[in-house]
Amino acid sequence: MDFGLKGKTALVCASSAGLGRGCAEALAGEGVNLVINGRTEETLEATAADLRARFGVEVTAVAADVTTEEGRAKLLEAAGEADILVNNAGGPPPGTWTDWEREDFIKALDANMLTPIALIKAMVPGMMERGWGRVVNITSRAVKAPIPALGLSNSARAGLTGYVAGTSRQIARSGVTMNNLLPGMHDTDRVKKLDQNAADTQGISFDEARKKRLAGSVMGRDGTAEEFGAACAFLCSKQAAFITGQNILADGGEVNATL
Ligand code: NAD
């Protein structure tokens, strides 16, 4: 299927590794030129070189923290009149509800709610003027089914979800769609770290810890960044023009709900 994206440009935030990189790769595979981003110059440049070599698209690498105003300014300058915005950043740390103070909430809201909103506000008006655009926000399955230890994430992402629900409808006649993609467990560095922590705490090997976790999962495996990226590319496609304001789970059926 031709997604009709050849020659378009996408800003994909937090994309030097993990799910953001999966999205960048899938878009590059559709002929989309990219502005990619990460905080570590070396990793980011390696990703950029790999994407250029494999897909022959233009890749601009911007080393910056997307959750800072300065970082976003650098990204927006590089993105210019980009057609696609994929919002992503690292998630807030785990903890217990009694630990979280105002400052912790402010940090989480800044990173996972107000950062994507700032980029949407900066980029969507241009997309609307040009009559075409796509916004995909990487959120979490925690939006549909809370993960108690991730209360900061549950809260901030719920805020973004509410904003997207209303805003996507306000802009719906312009040719710009806006959706959230909700990952469940995917085999990224972040999940590798979680399994390593479980292994260390329980005094078992990494493989044993992973096997134990997956034994209780619906599909018996984690998702891959490639699968996640493909879902993102579809939401950006011309074929997905009638899909907006939605929360699409990519979680292997883990959220146990009929609707
Ligand atoms: P990851 O840690 O594997 O990769 C994150 C990438 O983003 C890295 O390249 C990192 O350098 C970059 N990055 C992180 N924070 C950044 C920032 N502030 N500015 C610029 N670059 C930044 O993470 P991931 O597993 O790909 O997860 C991506 C998002 O999806 C996170 O918000 C995470 O909480 C959420 N999520 C992931 C999973 C999963 O299973 N992997 C599940 C649910 C939700």
Image (tube, rainbow, N blue to C red):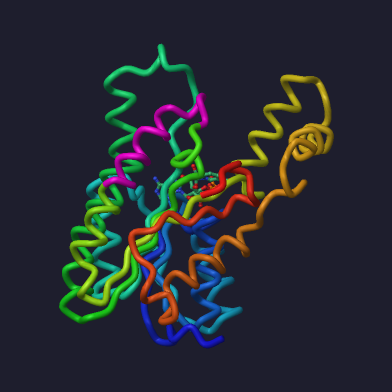
Task: From this view, report whether residue 244 is shown above or below residue 208.
Answer: below
> Which percent across, then down, holds residue 52?
53, 77
Residue depicted at x 51% and y 49%: 259
Residue depicted at x 84% and y 33%: 208
Residue 43 seen: no
> Which percent across, then down, holds residue 13?
40, 57
- Per the picture, the main secondary structure of the magenta-coloured stretch is helix
Farthest residue in the top direction? 98
Q: The N terminus lies in which quarter of the figure?
A: bottom right
Q: Is residue 136 left or right of residue 211?
A: left
Q: Is residue 132 left or right of residue 24?
A: left
State the image quarter where residue 191 is shown: top right
Residue range of the region highlighted in magenta in the rendering: 147-162
> Which percent across, then down, holds residue 105?
31, 27
Residue depicted at x 27% and y 20%: 102
Instruction: Find out whether residue 133 is within the magenta segment.
Output: no
Task: From this view, report whether residue 98 is shown above or below residue 259.
Answer: above
Q: Is residue 177 left or right of residue 121?
A: right
Between 141 and 29, the residue placed more toward the observer is 141
> Which percent across, then down, holds residue 86?
39, 62
Residue 2 seen: yes
Q: Report the number of numbered marks.
A: 0
Between 43 and 131, the residue placed more toward the observer is 131
